[in-house]
Image (spheres, rainbow, N blue to C red):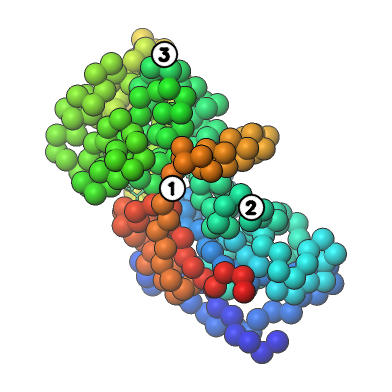
Amino acid sequence: MSQSAKRVVLVSRPVGEPKASDFRVEDHAVPTPGDGQVLLRTIWLSLDPYMRGRMSDGPSYAQPVPIGGVMEGGTVSEVVATNNPGFARGDIVLSRAGWQTHALSDGKGLAKIDPDLGPVSTAVGVLGMPGMTAYTGLLDIGRPQAGETVVVAAASGAVGSAVGQIARIKGARAVGIAGGADKCRYVKEELGFDDCVDHRDPGLAAKLKAACPKGIDVYFENVGGAVFEAVFPLLNAFARIPVCGLIAHYNDTEASAPKWAPSMMRNVLTKRLTIRGFIVSDFAARHADFLRDMSGWVREGRVKHREFVTEGLDSAPAAFIGLLKGANFGKQLVRVGPDKA
Ligand code: NDP
């Protein structure tokens, strides 16, 4: 095949915030599938905060992307040629094809997407990894009870928006924390959270306290940093803290001094707090429950979601750099190619 394809590779490991020069867009010929392989054409590329970790080679739960390697990522892709009896031309699949327009696969790890569940882009959003992260972290670790208060930061984003809406479905009071008035308005007025506080407001701690008059029973941790410091004193006895992400720290260049670790641990003891980190794959066994419940809630309009789309593979590096500092407003996606013809 002489048609041309594109991929984004990692050029250098960022120190602090990633820069455009840490990435390179390369042109190459569209590959030809061998025996047992399929050729995938990317429609949607999901950009997610975890990718910052894959750019570094420090200790982690996952392997880094090698220098010169294609950036990792989840995609919604179309099978455009197949030598694999398990897949037909035109199948739409969830894949880990990464930041590229085309990819070969032996079929392992591909999952066919049911277009009846919703627009196929939701397979990397509210009905995919971020939605499942919200569902399992909140329900299996946070375990909100009716009447309790659930707080979540990055509340307009892919994970946080679902956390607050599920909390409401379970009868809890949902309080979001988000960056800026527009995001806070959306979180309250469109997503139906009970309240939302702007983390850029210098009065964050006092405003959060006012928004949580009965304290906090579940804090779904997406952020860390100053937000965590504002939340911590408001935690009630027996509060649960699913630790999902620490995006405020992903560009840190050194470990911050644990200046208040002793007082934090004293509170963990006296308030009998449960703090549990998790990776969504820990809960793989819950996938069928998640898909059943979440697709129902989305269909009934009880869980709303918002996509933030940039156009073309070339836009991925800048969009990713923006995601780490709140430039996205909703689930960050790149439209790499047109929907299936
Ligand atoms: P989002 O769509 O929420 O986008 C990231 C958001 O983080 C930004 O829009 C910004 O929102 C917020 N943010 C960035 N920097 C800061 C900061 N310093 N302080 C406060 N907020 C900040 O991303 P996701 O929903 O995909 O991910 C949310 C979190 O969940 C991340 O920490 C991610 O790593 C984690 N995650 C963990 C998984 C797991 O398996 N454990 C799986 C998936 C995600 P704003 O403008 O409101 O500040």
| Tag shown at residue 305 | 1
Left or right, residue 154 beside residue 92: left
Considering only order in the chain, which callout, 2 or 3, is on the residue closer to the N terminus?
2
* Badge 2 element: helix
* Badge 3 element: strand
Q: CA distance from mark 1 to mark 3?
A: 31 Å
Please identify the quadrant where the N terminus is shown.
bottom right
Which label lies toward us, 1 or 3? 1
Q: Is residue 191 visible?
A: yes
Question: Which residue: 66% across, 89% down?
Answer: 2
* Badge 1 element: loop
Q: Is mark 1 within 8 Å of ligand 1?
A: no
The residue carrying pointer 2 sits among few (fewer than 14), some (14 to 19) or many (20 or more) residues within 10 Å by Cα, namely few
The image shows residue 87 at horizontal and vertical percentages of 78, 63
- Residue furthest to the bottom: 2
| Tag shown at residue 229 | none
Q: Is residue 287 above or below residue 253?
A: above
The residue pinned by badge 3 equals 238
Left or right, residue 89 beside residue 95: right
The image shows residue 249 at horizontal and vertical percentages of 35, 45
Q: Is residue 270 above or below residue 2?
A: above
Question: Which residue: 62% across, 70% down?
Answer: 340
The residue carrying pointer 1 sits among few (fewer than 14), some (14 to 19) or many (20 or more) residues within 10 Å by Cα, namely many
Considering only order in the chain, which callout, 1 or 2, is on the residue closer to the N terminus?
2
| Tag shown at residue 116 | 2
Q: Which of these two is toward me, 93 or 115? A: 115
Q: CA distance from mark 2 to mark 1?
A: 17 Å
Considering only order in the chain, which callout, 3 or 1, is on the residue closer to the N terminus?
3
